[in-house]
């Protein structure tokens, strides 16, 4: 599936299920996406300090009255490191094995760190079929709502250890956890989607190549001119670059959900976000 149209395909999955909810002036339900580059260090091992800071901040925000869903990548990278693989796995069977090991490790750490702050977490692993079939989608929505009502923090990832289509198939719906986070935001009727990246937001050119690159603070419409500004993949450990974040913001904004892209090196930026301060790049949510 062409990259530009993946968000359009996802949008069609949800168009019939949107109830025309208008944006809240105060974000109540927030979906936060963290990628591999945020969760691991340069050696590919878990970044424990970052994960604990993330857990503390999310726990504190929940204490302030917000509902939070965390979409987390990193299973394959963490699993490959724990299996002591000399390089990133390339075969499907090794990728799925690494995903199984890494997902277990990540959830152990999340449960431990969130537990420090008296929070309960739940694991939800998704396949594309889970949101393409109406009965499954309804059951999934009910599960999310029930967990949030009980004060639980759902932690979501693709079910890579089972579903090969979401690792490297051309027909994959999510494509990357950036898009998965947008799908979850729409499914749960969130008010805000926060995507943590390895740079400060959306720039007019790649800031890693051009020192004069300027951060764009607000984008009201995502069109072809905006897509042309996006480059390829980001860090060597992650699979998604700014283009996948644009696709995710495209889907979320079409359903009235604001999307903020900012640097995952500073999870405490969430405090500024809920306080209404200027952080990263905001893609305005506008219902079509």
Image (cartoon, helix red, strand yellow):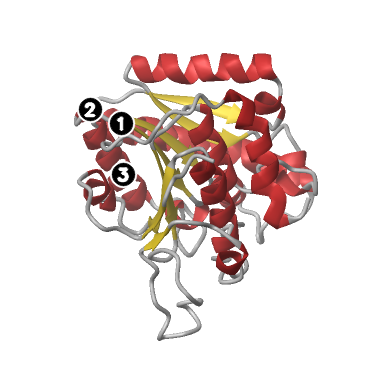
Local packing at callout 3 (Cα closer than 10 Å; few below 14, some 14-19, many 20+) is: some
Residue 198 screen position, x and y as percent: 44, 63
Q: For this view, does 171 lie left or right of residue 38?
A: right
Q: How many angstroms separate mark 2 from mark 1 (CA)?
A: 7 Å
User: Does 193 sit above or below residue 221?
Assistant: above
Mark 3: secondary structure: helix
User: According to the image, label 3 marks what residue?
Assistant: 52
Image disc number at residue 253: none
Mark 1: secondary structure: loop
Q: Quadrant of residue 280?
A: bottom left
Mark 2: secondary structure: loop
The one of 247 and 107 positioned closer to us in this rendering: 247
| Residue in the picture at 40% in, 32% down | 22
Contact check, label 2 and label 1, Cβ < 8 Å: yes
Q: How many angstroms separate mark 1 from mark 3 (CA)?
A: 23 Å
Residue 118 screen position, x and y as percent: 25, 25
Residue 35 screen position, x and y as percent: 49, 51
Q: For this view, does 277 lie left or right of residue 156?
A: left
| Residue in the picture at 43% in, 36% down | 70
Q: Is residue 175 visible?
A: no
| Residue in the picture at 79% in, 44% down | 171
Q: For this view, does 69 lie left or right of residue 17?
A: left
Q: For this view, does 124 lie left or right of residue 166?
A: left
User: According to the image, label 1 marks what residue?
Assistant: 28
Image disc number at residue 65: 2
Q: How many angstroms separate mark 2 from mark 3 (CA)?
A: 20 Å
Contact check, label 2 and label 3, Cβ < 8 Å: no
**In this rendering, which labeled residue sits more in front, label 2 or label 3?**
2
Q: Quadrant of residue 183?
A: top right
Local packing at callout 2 (Cα closer than 10 Å; few below 14, some 14-19, many 20+) is: few
């Amino acid at each position: 599936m062409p990259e530009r149209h993946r968000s359009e395909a996802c949008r069609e999955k949800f168009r019939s299920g949107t109830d025309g909810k208008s944006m809240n002036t105060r974000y109540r339900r927030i979906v936060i996406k963290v990628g591999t580059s945020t969760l691991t260090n340069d050696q590919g091992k878990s970044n424990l300090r970052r994960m604990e800071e993330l857990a503390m901040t999310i726990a504190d925000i929940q204490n302030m009255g917000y509902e939070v869903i965390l979409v987390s990548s990193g299973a394959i990278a963490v699993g490959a490191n724990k299996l002591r693989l000399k390089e990133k796995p390339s075969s499907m069977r090794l990728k799925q094995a690494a995903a199984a090991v890494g997902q277990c490790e990540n959830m152990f750490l999340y449960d431990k760190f969130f537990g420090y702050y008296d929070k309960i977490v739940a694991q939800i692993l998704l396949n594309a079929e889970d949101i393409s079939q109406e009965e499954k989608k309804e059951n999934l929505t009910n599960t999310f709502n029930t967990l949030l009502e009980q004060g639980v923090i759902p932690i979501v990832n693709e079910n890579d250890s089972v579903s090969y289509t979401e690792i490297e198939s051309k027909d994959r719906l999510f494509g990357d956890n950036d898009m998965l986070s947008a799908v979850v935001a729409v499914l749960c009727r969130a008010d805000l989607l926060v995507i943590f990246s390895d740079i400060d937001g959306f720039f007019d050119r790649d800031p890693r190549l051009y020192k004069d690159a300027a951060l764009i603070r607000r984008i009201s419409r995502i069109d072809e001119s905006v897509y042309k500004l996006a480059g390829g993949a980001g860090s060597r450990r992650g699979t998604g670059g700014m283009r996948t974040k644009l696709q995710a913001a495209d889907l979320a904004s079409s359903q009235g959900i604001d999307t903020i892209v900012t640097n995952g090196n500073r999870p405490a930026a969430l405090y500024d976000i809920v306080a209404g301060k200027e952080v990263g790049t905001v893609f305005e949510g506008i219902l079509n």
